[in-house]
Image (tube, grey):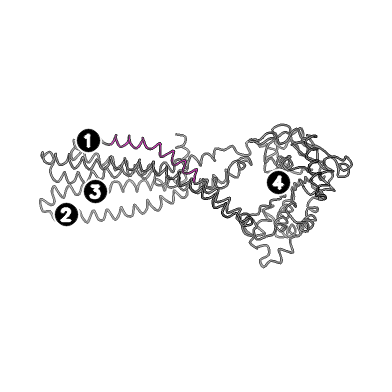
């Protein structure tokens, strides 16, 4: 019942079209009763009594009525589908808005292609159900009732004999309905996997070609595709049983009418005119039954899709524990106080981490991959929440701030730069949507990419392709830096911002980053230790803990793990690397 209420909610904005659609459907059903009624009068009265004028009048009147029905059907098809598409658009917008509010953890556990499948395939099935569902039930239900009453009016005994087969029909349909529902759900899961595999393969097409692994990707897709074929095969098998059995019962109706009607005619309990009318009318009785049977497949697709839609809509939103304070005019003092954190599917990532960053200072996080450096960066803008301990900005727990105001104070430059499809200007202005052209130009100059932009034929209006595919790695990175300059945050996080670049490009971008770090509290995650020698403090993070802490010179003098790590940057020595790993294990 709750499912139905939530579905009906989407009809409310389209109440007028819905009422008109149902009215048109009602009139179509009434007009459908005209043919057997006129046929009976013709066979019983007009033709035997040679009332040719009435035959012509009824024929012309019936033709005019059918013209009206044609217009009504056009209205139902056009405006009914328009209503369905509008409902689909509203659901799609609601789903997109919901996806924007879901936490990082949701995207850690759900593939993009599967989410897209719910946004496209499932919502299409829902819109078809939204349009055809009420209309089919209304027309079929009314026609079924009206035709049965009319059949009883002709010969109630023969009508009851036919109606006795209806319970058998509904028993069979209900028996196979469960099989269809399970099969349709499996089918939707399978097509979602196909979409996920397709999205992954297309996104990684350059990697595939670089490693000449086209055959491997074809094999992966072929496997997923075959799973879909198997799932659809099970669905079609269930559908085949359902439709074949139900159609057999409706065929039995015709056999009963033929035999029982013939016996009634032979016994003179019914005349030829009524018998002929009964045969015509019984098809009107069978037709809505077939319509309802055919509707079951659409209902299963639509209802399954709506349940999958609600699974996303019922996910817990990111701002469920959001504070109400506005994070503004901050200095940028950051403090981690006994912070512990782990992801849902893993053990402890951070184990009792504590440190402070005074405003305007630069701190660097170094250490082996998987030690917890990036996790520390993700906790500050609350992409994830700590399990224990607290993180404060200017002495205020970040949980007390609204997420929007908190994140406005934080700028992030990552190794894997994400650029949106569109122009250079579109991507820079993402840092401040209401920025003026002068501000955009100034940001580009500070990021040392202005001259390159102006060398392009279309300048700032140059299209960069999907995810900036037309740009080099360094150009992408400088665009992301320009975006941060425009945002002008008080806290800056550089998460291996230059590790994917060559040395020459890194030197060019390092100047932009140094300019960006001025007067901002900065956290740098870096593998190349030469880039963080001038940091105010360096933390060596390993196994979720701070192993060493101090300036570059202090850590070198300690002659510990940091020194070994630093030396490995310049000496390709496997023995040193082994010693470093052993050292980290011992100190852990």
- Of callouts 4 and 3, which one flags the residue occurring earlier in the amino acid sequence? 3
Mark 4 or 2: in front is: 4
Q: CA distance from mark 4 to mark 3?
A: 68 Å
Tag 2's secondary structure?
Answer: helix
Q: What numbered label is drawn on residue 160?
A: 1
- x, y (%) of residue 211? 63, 55
What is the magenta range?
A: 166-190
- Of callouts 1 and 2, which one flags the residue occurring earlier in the amino acid sequence? 2
Q: What numbered label is drawn on residue 34?
A: 3
- Of callouts 4 and 2, which one flags the residue occurring earlier in the amino acid sequence? 2
Tag 1's secondary structure?
Answer: helix
Residue 543 or residue 16, whichever sits in front: 543
Q: Dot 2 surroundings within 10 Å: few (below 14), some, or many (20 or more)?
A: some
Mark 1 or 4: in front is: 1
- Of callouts 2 and 3, which one flags the residue occurring earlier in the amino acid sequence? 3
Is residue 130 a member of the stretch shown in magenta?
A: no
Mark 1 or 3: in front is: 1
Q: Quadrant of residue 382?
A: top right
- x, y (%) of residue 225? 49, 49
* Pointer 2 residue: 55
Q: Is residue 308 visible?
A: yes
Q: What numbered label is drawn on residue 408?
A: 4
- x, y (%) of residue 311? 53, 39
- Of callouts 1 and 3, which one flags the residue occurring earlier in the amino acid sequence? 3
Q: Dot 1 surroundings within 10 Å: few (below 14), some, or many (20 or more)?
A: few
Q: Quadrant of residue 447?
A: bottom right
């Amino acid at each position: 019942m709750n499912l139905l209420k939530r579905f009906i909610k989407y009809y409310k904005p389209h109440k007028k079209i819905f009422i008109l659609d149902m009215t048109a459907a009602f009139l179509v059903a009434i007009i459908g009763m005209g043919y057997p009624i006129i046929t009976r009068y013709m066979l019983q009265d007009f033709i035997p009594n040679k009332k040719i004028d009435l035959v012509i009048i009824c024929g012309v009147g019936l033709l005019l009525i059918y013209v009206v029905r044609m217009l009504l059907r056009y209205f139902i098809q056009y405006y009914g589908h328009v209503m369905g598409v509008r409902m689909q658009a509203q659901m799609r917008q609601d789903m997109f808005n919901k996806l924007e509010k879901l936490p990082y953890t949701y995207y850690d556990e759900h593939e993009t292609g599967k989410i897209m499948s719910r946004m496209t395939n499932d919502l299409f099935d829902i819109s078809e159900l939204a349009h055809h569902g009420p209309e089919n039930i209304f027309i079929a239900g009314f026609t079924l009732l009206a035709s049965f009453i009319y059949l009883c009016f002709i010969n109630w005994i023969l009508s009851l004999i036919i109606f006795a087969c209806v319970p058998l029909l509904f028993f069979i349909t209900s028996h196979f309905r469960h099989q269809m529902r399970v099969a349709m759900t499996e089918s939707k899961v399978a097509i979602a996997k196909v979409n996920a595999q397709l999205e992954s393969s297309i996104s990684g097409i350059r990697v595939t070609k670089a490693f000449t692994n086209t055959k491997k990707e074809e094999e992966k897709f072929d496997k997923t595709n075959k799973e879909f074929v198997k799932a659809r095969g099970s669905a079609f098998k269930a559908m085949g049983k359902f439709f074949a059995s139900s159609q057999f019962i409706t065929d039995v109706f015709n056999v009963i009418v033929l035999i029982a009607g013939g016996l009634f005619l032979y016994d003179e309990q019914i005349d030829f005119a009524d018998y002929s009318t009964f045969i015509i009318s019984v098809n009107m009785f069978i037709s809505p039954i077939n319509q309802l049977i055919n509707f079951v497949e659409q209902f299963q697709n639509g209802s399954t899709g709506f349940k999958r839609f609600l699974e996303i809509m019922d996910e817990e939103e990111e701002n469920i524990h959001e504070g109400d304070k506005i994070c503004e005019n901050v200095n940028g003092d950051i403090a981690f106080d006994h912070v512990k954190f782990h992801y849902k599917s893993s053990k402890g990532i951070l184990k009792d981490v504590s440190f402070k960053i005074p405003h305007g200072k630069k701190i660097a996080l170094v250490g082996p991959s998987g030690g917890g450096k990036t996790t520390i960066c993700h906790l500050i803008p609350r992409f994830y929440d700590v399990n224990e301990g607290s993180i404060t900005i200017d002495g205020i727990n970040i949980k007390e701030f609204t997420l929007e105001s908190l994140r406005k104070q934080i700028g992030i430059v990552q190794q894997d730069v994400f650029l949106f499809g569109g122009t250079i200007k579109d991507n820079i202005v993402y840092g401040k949507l209401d920025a003026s052209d002068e501000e955009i130009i100034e940001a580009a100059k500070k990021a040392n990419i202005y001259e390159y932009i102006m060398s392009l034929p279309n300048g700032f209006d140059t299209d960069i392709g999907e995810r900036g595919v037309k740009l080099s790695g360094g150009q992408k990175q400088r665009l992301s830096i320009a975006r941060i300059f425009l945002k002008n945050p008080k806290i800056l996080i550089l998460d291996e911002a230059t590790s994917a670049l060559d040395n020459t490009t890194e030197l060019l971008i390092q100047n932009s980053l140094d300019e960006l770090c001025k007067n901002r509290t900065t956290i740098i995650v870096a593998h190349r230790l030469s880039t963080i020698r001038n940091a105010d403090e360096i933390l060596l993070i390993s196994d979720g803990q701070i192993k060493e802490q101090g300036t570059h010179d202090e850590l070198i003098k300690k002659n510990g793990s940091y020194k070994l790590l630093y030396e490995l940057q310049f000496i390709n020595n496997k023995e040193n690397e082994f010693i470093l790993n052993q050292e980290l294990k011992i100190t852990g």
